[in-house]
Structure formats: C-alpha cells, structure tokens
Amino acid sequence: MVSEHFKRKLTAILSADVQGFSRLMEDDEAATVRTLTACREMIGNIIKKRRGRVVDSPGDNLLAEFASVVDAVQCAVEIQEKLKASNAELPDHRRMAFRIGINLGDVIVEQERIYGDGVNIAARIEGLSKGGGICISGTVHEHVKNKLALGYDFLGEYQVKNISEPVRVHRVRMESGVEESENVSDQTEALKLPEKPSIAVLPFVNLSQDPQQEYFSDGITEGIITSISKVGDLFVIARTSSFKYKGRAVDVQQVGRELGVRYVMEGSIQRSGERIRITAQLVDTKTEHHLWAERYDRDLKDIFAVQDEITMKIITAMQVKLTEGEQARISAKGTKNLESYEKYLQGIQYIRRFNLEGNVLARQMLEEAIALDAEYAMAYGLLGWTHLMDVWLGWSKSPPTSIEQVYKLAQKALTLDDTLAESHNLLGRIYLLKRQYEKAIAEAELVIASEPNAAFGIFLLAETLMYAGRSGEAILLFKKAFRLDPFPPSHLFHGLGASYLLTGQYNEVIAACRKAIRLSPDSLFAHIILAAAYGSADRDEEALAEIAEVHRINPQFSLEFLAKTWPYKNKADVEKYVAPLRKAGLK
C-alpha cells in the first residue's frame, strides 16, 4: 500500500477573477493594471480582516482560504460591496467587476499552496457567477443558509469541467442589491397547472449499500418517465428538470409550484444480490395526499415487469384511459438480458459526462451490451449518439464517416423497434446535418407522435424549423419545450436565442444566451450567438468580449467553419451571424 506524504485539510476556498479582463487590457493596459493593483490591495485587506489568507494571485485571478465558511461568504459580500462603491467613481467602460466562487472542500497542502478538486470546484463555480456576484457550492450553502442575513437562489446542478460528479450551485442575494435575482428557468411567472393530469417523477433514491448502483436507480426512474411520456393525455415533466431534485429533501408542494404539476411520484430502490426492493408512491402536490403507494420485493430478472406495473398504476391512479397504440408502446421493451441492460445504463451515465473519456467508455459499454444481445434496439441508438458526439465536439477524424455510422446505427435501431423516439431523434439530427430539412421535420414529428411529452422531440422540430428559415414557428416551439422542462439544459436557451437573432430581437437573444452561459460557461454556440447579437445591436465592446470567449473555448473557430457547418438553408440567415461577427473581429 502506498502511503501519502502530503498533508490534507478541509478548508473554505474563495476564487475570484475579473469579468472581461482581456477587453480592459486591450483598451488601456496601464489604467487596467493600476485599477487591478488597487482592487487587489483592497481585497487582500478585507480577506485578512475576515481571518482568511491569500494563497495566490496570478494575473486577474485571486485564490484565498478560510477556516470558516461563514467568514468566507461574509468576506465575499464585503468585497463586492466595496468594489461596487469604488466602481461608481469610474467610467462605465473602465469598471472592474469581479466574479467570486466559494467552495468547502478537502485540499492538499504543500508549503503555502493548496491543490485538489476542492480548489478546482471553487474556480468552476466562480465562472458561473456574473461580474459583481457570488456563487457558492451546495456544501457551503448547507453551512451558511441559516447563519447569515442573505438570500440564496438555487441555480441547479452543473456538470463542470474535469469534475466527474455534478456540482450543486447557489447564487448569493445580498441585501445591498449587488446582484439582481435572475431565474435560470425561462419562466417569469408561477407555472399554471396544465389542463391534463400533470406529473413529475423524481429520481428514485438508491438505498443499496453500493453507491455505484446509482446508475441502476436512475435508469429505472428514466424508464418510468419515458413510458408515461408516451401517453398523450398526460403532461409529464422532462428528466432534466425532475433530476434537479436528486439528493435533496423534497417538499412536494414546493416541487408542484416549481414544476407546475399536480402530482409527484417518488420512491426508492434497494438491490441485494439477485433480489430487488422498490417502494413507490404517488402524491397530490396540493393536499399531500397519497393517491397510491406500493412496495415490490422481486427477483432482479423481473425488473422490467415491475417497471411496467408501476407505470400502469400511475396511469390508473390519475384516471387516464390509454389508446390501443399507447398500450402497445408503454411496456418496457428492450432486452431480457440483465447484464446487457446494466451496460446500457452505464453507457448513459458515461455519455452524459460530455467529455472524450466518457464518450469512449460509453461506446465500450454499448458495444458490450450489443454483443450480449444483438437485438437490443436502444443500445444501437445510444451507440449512434456516441458517434454523433464525436462530430459535434470535434473528436472525429472523419466527420463524414462518423455521420454515416450514426445513420446506419439509427436505421438498425428503428428496424428492431420503430417506436423508439430517441432513435427517430437521432435520425432527424443526421438529416439536419445533411440539410435534408423535410426528412428531418418528418423524424421530429415521429418523435412527438410516439412520445408526446418528449421535450427533446419538440426541441428537434424547433431547431430544424429554425435552420430551414422558419424562426417564428421555432420560437413558439422552443417555449413549448420550456414548459415541459422548466429547468432546461443550456442548448434549449441558445436554440431560442438563435431563433430570436434571426428575427432581429436582440434583447431577447442576449437574455436567452446569458442563461445558457450561466448553465454552461463553455458553451461555444451560446457565446457565438451572443457575440452576433451584441454586434448587431452595436454593443461593440461586449461583442469583443464574447469573441474573446469564443477564441478561449476554440482557438480554431472561424467564420468559414461556421458558414460551412451550421446547416442554415438560407444564405441570408448565415449572413446574420457573419456580418456582426466579422465587424467584431472574428475571421
């Protein structure tokens, strides 16, 4: 056994940097350095007063540590208040806005330096903050939420770079009003209940002794969501939003208000050897009355039958009648090979890392799943997505070859099961890349027909219409997708932003893309669309700052690449990007 020769400790880490620092330096280096020096001295004095220690301060960055998370948060608030006062004395274009992120984590200590995931997470959280704002991790929030006279907005769980597990993030709302509250969701009013019976299926809690079984409980939850999403007379919240509550103590009335649903389903899964115990309950969010509750003790091989039974119990309890087509679609098809199913579920977890390593591992799992069951349609479809990820994220050595591979895998999946909404979604994306717009629209409509509550199907149709020159229709569909997914992924926001750009609604573009970037700071598409909007609105300095972000994320990105690869049908739509981006300095 190898022993560790370094020291570890638990500490509160504060990470800060200047928003738009490159633009400030380009505009006036000497003035920027003078302002930064003054700010750094002031910040250092506040940190010392609050019993903290500056660990490092390269460039415009600053890293500090505190023995107390309360001290760290109070220090951050004081820093932002003092900076706000000092910025008021400067011209708008010379103001220096710091972003601050705070995390509580285990670190490695080497002399005066600290290292480790605790530090990295603080830096990633900082990137989620706006200039003049403070974001904190879930661990920090737990320690300070009842100790300080501050408000907090839960922003959601974020998959941040080089960190395997999602990070829970809260924004600090200061009494002094340093930063205005801004909902991450696109909803600006309380969500009204749909006319149809509405439900959110929350992530089943993994009660197994092995935490590695998390993928299994998540997979069962997603299977149930998929099954009931096929029922046209139900309104079902998307997986993305339901899983925002994973790992949280849930108040069903609060969930009902936040998601705009009448019913919530929750439960737990405990796996032991070849046996499985599942508890499930359906709760009315208005009265907290339990409409139905059940416990299942079964052999593991019966898992698909149990999933079907739970699905039917939900539908019955909500007094919904199925059509013949829905009865045929909702049963949990897939594989009778349990090992193949588990590899498929592991593949889902790996692909959602959205990095090269995760994509490689997902492909390996799915190829093994298919080797165990050559008729497993869902595995072929998900394998196709790994090849499409290679194209989207620039990992493919031959994009045309990868696209053809995706096409073959989607066709194979649909040959085995033509009701698979995800595979129609995959095929629709290939048609879109090939600029076969009518075929892409037809596939999107097949997704919606087979799974009416699938937000991803509505998103595909909206995006296809946008690329085909029908942005007005696309905007309405994007908004419909938001209702099914009130806490949506970033691509839904930048898709809406792109549609607004093509219709000349620049303020709406900016609002949507800022939300996309808050969810995913390294979203290349969101930064490009935002830069084009700023350029079109003659907000040149902000356009320059966004171009700098584009170059940071992808130094090779060019206008030529955009024109060739973004599948717009009309040249006039491409020019709505090219002209303002060229004006902002992108070549």
Image (spheres, grey):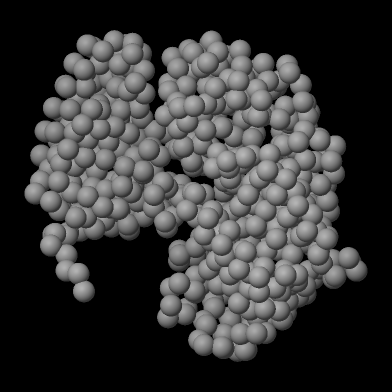
> How many tags in the picture?
0
Above or below for 410 versus 231 = above
566 relative to 555 in the view: left or right: right
Residue at image x 21%, y 55%?
A: 107
Say if 297 sits above or below 87 in the image: below
Q: Is residue 133 above or below residue 296?
A: above
x, y percent for residue 536: 58, 14
Which quadrant of the figure has residue 420? bottom right
Residue 196 lies in what quarter of the image? bottom right
Rendering coords of residue 113 (x, y %):
14, 46
- In the image shown, does 499 or 479 lie closer to the viewer? 499
Extreme residue in the right direction? 324
x%, y% of residue 521?
45, 37
Nearer to the camera, 23 or 89: 23
Image coords of residue 166 (percent x, y): 44, 55
- Residue at 85% x, 44% y is 442
Residue at figure coordinates x 47%, y 80% from the top left: 208
The residue sitting at 22% across, 11% down in the picture is: 30
Examine the rendering and report whether any part of residue 145 can be seen. Answer: no
Classify residue 390 by image quadrant: top right
Quadrant of the image for the N terminus? bottom left
Task: Judge by depth and name the residue closer to the eye, 355 or 121.
Answer: 355
Q: Is residue 216 visible?
A: yes
